[in-house]
Amino acid sequence: SLCRSFRRLRGCSPLAAVRRVRLQFVRRDLLAAGPEARVTDVAMRWGFYHLGRFSRLYAAQFGELPSATHRRSQSGAARAPQAAAVGC
């Protein structure tokens, strides 16, 4: 099937690949957001409505909580290195 071929080629399901891209967009938006932005709003804009699960997925992919990314972007600190790719 198409899903099986995708998994064999990429090492993860199509859903996991799309989720990974959405998390990258959340990170980009958090790094660019102003102090008035809320992590919840950014996560929901990208379709993450279960915030506990979102936070866990984000931390697994980037090695820090989304709130830490946003806080760091407000302090003007340099961007942290991206975590190693997991799966796709």
Image (cartoon, rainbow, N blue to C red):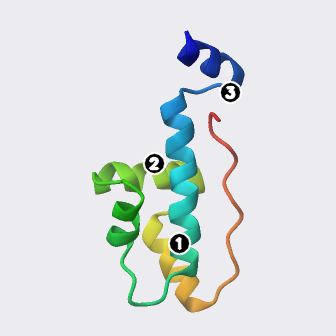
For disc 3, the marked residue is 10
Q: Nearer the viewer, mark 2 or mark 1?
A: 1
Tell me: residue 60, above or below residue 80.
above
Residue at 49% over, 73% down: 68
At horizontal 34% and vertical 62% (from top left) the residue drawn is 44
Closer to the chain start, of discs 2 and 1, is 1
Q: Disc 1 residue type?
A: Asp
Observer-nearest of 3 and 53: 3
Any mark on residue 20, and which?
Answer: none
- The amino acid type, in three-letter code, at marker 3 is Arg
Between the residue at mark 2 and the residue at mark 1, the CA separation in whole angstroms equals 16 Å
Rendering coords of residue 56 (x, y %): 41, 50
- Marker count (numbered): 3
Q: Secondary structure at mark 3?
A: helix
Kindly indicate whether the residue at mark 1 contacts the one at mark 2 (C-beta within 8 angstroms): no
Residue 83 location (% of width, % of height): 66, 54
Q: Position of residue 49 (x, y in %)?
A: 28, 54
Mark sitting earlier along the chain (1/3): 3
User: Which residue type carries mark 2?
Assistant: Leu
Q: Which residue is mark 2?
A: 57
In the picture, the disc for residue 29 is 1
| Mark before the other along the chain sequence, 2 or 3 | 3
Image quarter where the N terminus lies is top right
Q: Residue at x 50, y 82 (%)?
A: 33
